[in-house]
Amino acid sequence: MRVAESKTNTASPGWEDAQTIFRNLSTAELVEESIRNREGTLSDTGALVCHTGKFTGRSPLDRFIVKDAFTKDTVGWSDSNIPFEAERFDRLLHKMTAFLLERQLYVRDAYAGAHPDYRLNLRFVNTLAWHDLFCENIFLRLAPSELEKHRPAFTIICAPDFEADPEQDGTRQENFTVINFSKKIVLIGGTGYAGEIKKAVFTVMNYLLPLEQKILTMHSAANVGQAGDTAVFFGLAGTGKTTLATVPERFLIGDDAHGWNANSIFNFEGGCYAKVVNLSHKQEPRIWDAVQFGTILENTTFYEGSRTVNYADTSLTENTRAVYPIYYIPETIKYSRAGTPKHIFFLTADAFGVLPPIARLNASQALYYFLLGYTAKVEGTEVGITDPEATFSACFGEAFMPLHPMVYAELLGKKLTEHPVQVWLVNTGWTGGPFGVGSRIKLRLTRAMIRAALEGALDHVAFTTHPVFGIEMPDECLGVPASLLNPRNTWGNKEHYDNQAEALAALFIANFEKYADCAGAEIMAGAPCVGLTV
């Protein structure tokens, strides 16, 4: 019910002294608030279309972690985990609190972690109603009976209109995300991109669970079959995690963030954050149908003179998104958890056209490729990129992993030893040549190969070992042309392919040098071999 709480009897410090606070409004109320505040517009399917302003994606160089006695020896400090002074955090919090006192606030109580043993209670403080709806959609929802006794372990404050002064506040520019693990507060300002809220919570989980509980945390989607066979899909943005995990024949566990304990996979979230560029009912019917009342569409536009969304329009950004509760997908597993995985898929959009569309990895290769976290950017994904550009993000999510990558790799290695898991590398990128020459592998073919792996059809076929990367490529797969399975066969000029393969392998080896002293012989055995093409 839309009732602002009275402040006449409160003695609470900080933002709770704001003049108007709305707590835990319903979806309908938040949609009404968003429209009343002119934050968004309804589409013809009932979805709320909102624009995020200057920032249409995350800003990794503006994400900081407070360096203090609690974090100085545990965080893997790097370009992804940038230290921030505790004193400057306190000053920034004080300034931000003063700003919030003059604003109308939307407060949301929720939690992350679908397993009851690893639940993290959260409180979100937003100045925008649609950001509050984002939190309602993406995180796990409390039952009405739980709200009274809810005590947050972390508070996330987001105020897009509050900008930092870099010189005074110690930020790089006006926008920022600062995580303080000691005070259990996250500050987000200067950006309207709601994904910063989601990834901040993911970062917190990726710090606490491996460090305190020895839980492997994963930037992954996950689903489970009718027979209880769980599959995990690792991948960076644009590689197909959500699309490939959201299929009618399997139950969705989650599309982005999971933990793996001794006997289960569990979702951190209660919603999905799907890319919708070029979304169509034919290709992705479940995501298409999820765009309904209560769903948020970020940075999409309408066909002129209508309220029909033009998913092909990337004039604002390629990174258009739909944010919806996970129960909008009919095939969703109850309780958002399932047993340990039988299959793991590492997804990469190889724009160089070198890697096979599917390949079997041994344990050494699995850990090597996990630490690489390879994909490639192409024209249109980022400003200024016209040729394929190799991207390496350790653990397929380095920007959200506060500990050293080897911590997560060691946890994965332990899981692969304890459980019978087959790891696959799946290229959702190009074949027949690099971007601009070859063509992108068709989604239906990628789905056919993943289905064959899940159903055991690839257990009974011959494999060919790639001469450079050492990974095993199936010689046949039902529903897939045999010529596609070995990427060299798809290139007209085989010498050009061999040169490109060796060039990509050299990039792998150069990137992996930073792990040479800590990876160990087992992981290093998964490296490609340059100079052996035939």
Image: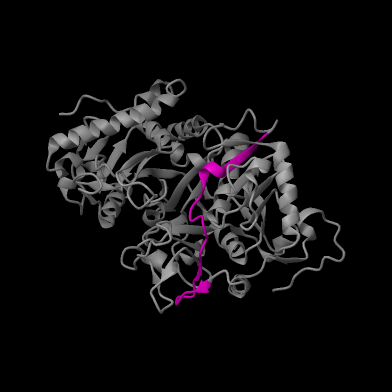
Residue sticking out furthest to the front: 167
* Quadrant (top left/top right/bottom left/bottom right) for the C terminus: top left
Q: Is residue 354 magenta?
A: no
As displayed, is residue 54 above or below residue 313?
Answer: above
Res. 262 in view: no
Asked where in the image residue 141 lies, by quadrant, the reply is bottom right
In the image: residue 128, left or right of residue 264 = right
Q: Where residue 387 sits in the image (x, y, percent)?
A: 29, 44
Residue depicted at 81% across the width and 53% down the height:
13
The front one of 61 and 31 is: 61
Colour treatment of the image: one colour
Q: Is residue 62 magenta?
A: yes
Q: Where residue 392 sits in the image (x, y, percent)?
A: 40, 37
Residue sticking out furthest to the bottom: 305
Q: Where residue 14 sits in the image (x, y, percent)?
A: 78, 53
In the image: residue 477, left or right of residue 145 = left
As displayed, is residue 530 above or below residue 348?
Answer: above
Give the residues drawn in magenta, as a range: 41-67
